[in-house]
Each structure stands twice: as C-alpha cells, then as structure tokens.
Image (spheres, rainbow, N blue to C red):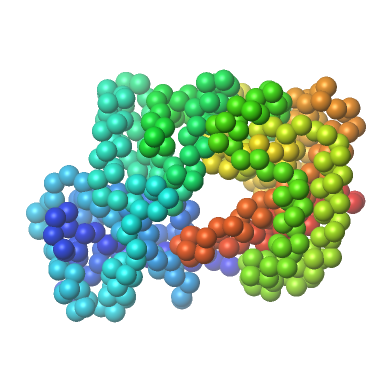
C-alpha cells in the first residue's frame, strides 16, 4: 500500500495582535500550507523550512492541533507556529474573527486551534511563546561561538534543537517534560561515569530539565551491515549494564523507577483482555487468531515471569527502548541516545528490541547463527553473575516478556497524545505480535 501524503496547514499568529497569517492562493486567502511525504510526527525542522521558503519567516513549531484520517491518500495536519525576529513586509494578516470568510477546511483548522487548550502541560515549556528565546539565550551563554540554532523535534515529551558553532562543531540541546526528568539526570550521570558509550554532556540546567551535548559523528546501527559491529554493540551495552549492578542505589536516587517482573506478570491479563489496545481485526491490529492465541498463553507468560525471577539475575540499568536506531556508531565506538524510558529492571528484557530491529533493518544480515553470536557477546558482560547456561536460559525466557513489557508501556499513552500521533496505536499490537513470534522461535 502506498503511504499517504501529508498536507500541513500552518497557523501563524501575529506576535502582538489578534491576527493570523494568510497567503494569496489564486485570489483566495488561505492558510499557508504544503504537502510532504510521511515523516515522524515529532519531526518539525522541515515544517519550519517550509515557512521560511514560502514566507521568509524564522519560526518554531509550538504544537500540533490535528491529525486526520487519510482521505483520498492525504492526511491533514494542523500546526501552530510562532515567529522569531522581525516580520518581512507585505505579509497578509487577518483578524481571527474574520477568518469565517475563508474556505471551509481553513475555517475548521482555525476553529480547532481556537478551541484547543493552550496551557502548558507537564512542564513542556517549548509549547509557549518566548521559550525558544530563553533556551537560545542559555545556549549562547554556554557556547560563545554559536552561529545557528534549529528546532529539530518537538512533541509532548521533549524538544530537540541542533546547535552549530563557528569553531567547536555541532551540539544538540534537549528539553524534556517534567514527567521525563529522569532522562536529564541519567544522561548527565552516564556521561560522567561512562563517557565511552554516551555523548559528552557540556552543560545542564536541571531545574528546567535542559542539557546540551556534543553531536555524535557516525551513523545509526540500523544502517550497519557488518555483523561484528552488531556483536560489539551488544557487548558494549551488556558491559554497561553489568557495571551498573552496584550502582542501582544511585540510579534510583536519580529518579529511575523500578520495573519488576511482577509488574509485567500482573499486567498480562489486563493487556490480553483489552480489545481496544490489541485492535483485533483492524488493519494495524492483531488478527483474531493472534488475539485469541495471546489470551490462551497468558498463564504461560506469567509462569515465564516466575521462572525468570527464580534465576536471580540482579536488577540493573535498563534502557527501555533499545532499538538499533538508538545506537550511534563511529570508528568502532558506540553511543547510546534517548534514555527517556530508562529504569531499574531485569537486564535481559533490553536485548529483545535490539534483535528484532536487526531483522527489520538488516534482513539480509539476520540469521539464527548471528543472533546466537550477539547473545553470547552480550552475556560476556554478566560472566560471574550466574553460570553461563543459566544466563542463556534467562535470556530466552526474557525475550517474549520484553515485548509484553513494551506493549504494557505503550498501552499507557494518553488518548490525546495518540490522537496527534496515530502510529502510537499500532505499537501495542506490534509489540504483542513480536512476543508471539518470540515464543514460536523459542519453541522451534
């Protein structure tokens, strides 16, 4: 199926008056708009680029207000932007109360914007005017040769800015919501104690949950087709987890929650009975056969949790989202990014998405033999924690449970968030399907 195209409508308010920017489209006033291929719904750099190309404006995206169902192969999205710097002459501003004379789809977009709550929720300050100037000022005071600051990503949980300097290279600034405070604390902690596997943090502003880190050279692991690199990445992560076993108290003091096997076990029945989350029969959901099978193995999965707990592998650092895209590779060195879902937990639930990502991103490389090699490389970091055979058994037990854990966490996303990022609704059935596939592989 051909993916839909996306039509973006831009609502740009006047900096000081109750007016909205319009453009002249063949004699008809319209909201600025453009059409793009599908991008991640948190990406915003290309939206600001379009505003600059069309209107000569320097903007950042405050928030998105609407994401429609596909109609005739097109999805409609509505974004609110704020202008920075002087306004070019010749722009066509229209009072909000006069917008009813526009075409119906623009009237609808403006109505959604006016009706939407505009207060900052969960400390996501980047969704209010003036925040970008505050953050940019802090960056300029920290780095004295800044030449450019570009908004790269923005959504409910975080905002990322790319910073270019005249002489010292590139950096990334990140701000997270109040509920994601642990990522700020953990990134700084890991950068201090494990600089070989985390980007160097230049400065932090803990009260605002801001930090500035060096941009990492290299490419995502998902683009690497050398098997040995995947083995070495898994081994590096395993060593990091093993090194954090005696640091669990530190991790908890920094704000890491503990995700236990008991919590996974308790959630299995709830998940198996939640048809709204599993979406049986929907195009992006489980099939009715898959949903029935998942319900039938709920007890077996709970028994698996108990068996894994009985092997007494110590809890430690758990990235929480260890897909290959979060590994950056350069000159045989590795860096892990995006610690948003970090926790203290069973270490072996980490590796399952890493291995699933191998099959998705490098299907020609994926093989049972390579998976075995990756697992052995990963487990070298835990030598001495338990006999080798017990570690391999624990890893096999953990694999389907890892995907159940992901599904349980995806299921907790707020409906208002999923409405703006509809692909999130697909994550629960996708994770459950991966759990079912892992059980089949373990049985074969």
Depth check, front residue: 225 or 34: 34
- Position in image of residue 440 (x %, y %): 84, 54
Q: How many marks?
A: 0
Asked if residue 229 is positioned above or below residue 404 in the image, the reply reads above
Asked if residue 37 is positioned above or below residue 86 in the image, the reply reads below
The residue shown at (15%, 68%) is 94
Q: Left or right: where does residue 50 sit relative to residue 362?
A: left
Q: Give the quadrant of residue 66.
A: bottom left
The residue shown at (29%, 44%) is 131
- Position in image of residue 323 (x %, y %): 63, 43
The residue shown at (69%, 32%) is 316
Asked if residue 270 is positioned above or below residue 211 in the image, the reply reads below
Depth check, front residue: 64 or 331: 64
Depth check, front residue: 36 or 237: 237
Q: Give the quadrant of residue 206.
A: top left
Specify whether residue 112 is in view.
Answer: yes
Asked if residue 11 is positioned above or below residue 209 in the image, the reply reads below
The residue shown at (31%, 75%) is 108
- Position in image of residue 138 (x %, y %): 29, 31
Q: Left or right: where does residue 234 sit relative to residue 389?
A: left
Specify whether residue 364 is in view.
Answer: no
**Quarter of the picture holding the N terminus:** bottom right
Q: Left or right: where does residue 352 sit relative to residue 11?
A: right
Q: Give the quadrant of residue 228.
A: top right
């Amino acid at each position: 199926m051909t993916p839909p195209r996306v039509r973006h409508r831009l609502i740009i308010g006047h900096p000081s008056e109750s007016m909205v920017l319009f453009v002249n489209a063949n004699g008809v006033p319209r909201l600025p708009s453009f059409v793009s291929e599908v991008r991640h719904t948190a990406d915003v750099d290309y939206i600001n680029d379009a505003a600059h190309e069309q209107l000569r404006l320097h903007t950042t995206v405050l928030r998105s207000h609407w994401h429609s169902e596909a109609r005739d192969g097109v999805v409609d999205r509505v974004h609110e932007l704020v202008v920075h710097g002087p306004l070019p002459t010749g722009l066509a501003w229209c009072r909000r109360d006069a917008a009813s004379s526009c075409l119906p789809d623009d009237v609808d977009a403006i109505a959604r914007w006016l009706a939407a709550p505009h207060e900052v929720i969960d400390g996501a300050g980047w969704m209010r005017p003036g925040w970008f100037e505050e953050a940019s000022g802090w960056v300029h005071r920290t780095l004295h040769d800044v030449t450019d600051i570009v908004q790269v990503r923005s959504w409910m949980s975080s905002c990322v800015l790319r910073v270019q300097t005249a002489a010292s290279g590139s950096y990334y600034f990140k701000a997270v919501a109040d509920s994601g405070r642990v990522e700020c604390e953990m990134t700084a902690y890991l950068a201090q104690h494990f600089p070989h596997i985390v980007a160097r943090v230049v400065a932090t502003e803990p009260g605002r949950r801001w930090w500035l880190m060096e941009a990492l050279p290299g490419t995502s692991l998902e683009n690497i087709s050398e098997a040995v690199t995947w083995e070495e990445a898994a081994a590096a992560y395993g060593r990091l987890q093993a090194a954090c076993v005696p640091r669990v108290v530190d991790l908890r003091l920094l704000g890491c929650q503990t995700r236990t096997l008991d919590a996974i076990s308790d959630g299995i029945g709830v998940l198996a009975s939640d048809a709204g989350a599993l979406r049986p029969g929907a195009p992006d959901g489980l099939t009715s056969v898959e949903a029935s099978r998942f319900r039938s193995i709920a007890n077996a999965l709970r028994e698996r949790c108990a068996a894994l707990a009985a092997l007494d592998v110590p809890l430690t650092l758990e990235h929480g989202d260890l897909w290959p895209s979060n590994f950056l590779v350069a000159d045989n060195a590795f860096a892990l990014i995006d610690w948003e879902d970090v926790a203290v937990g069973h270490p072996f639930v980490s590796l399952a998405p890493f291995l699933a990502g191998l099959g998705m991103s490098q299907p020609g490389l994926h093989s049972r033999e390579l998976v075995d090699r990756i697992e052995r490389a990963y487990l070298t970091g835990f030598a001495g924690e338990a006999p080798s055979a017990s570690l391999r058994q624990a890893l096999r037990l953990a694999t389907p449970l890892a995907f159940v854990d992901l599904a349980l966490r995806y299921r907790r996303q707020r409906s208002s968030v999923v409405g703006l990022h509809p692909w999130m609704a697909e994550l629960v059935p996708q994770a459950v399907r991966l759990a079912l596939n892992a059980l089949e592989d373990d049985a074969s």
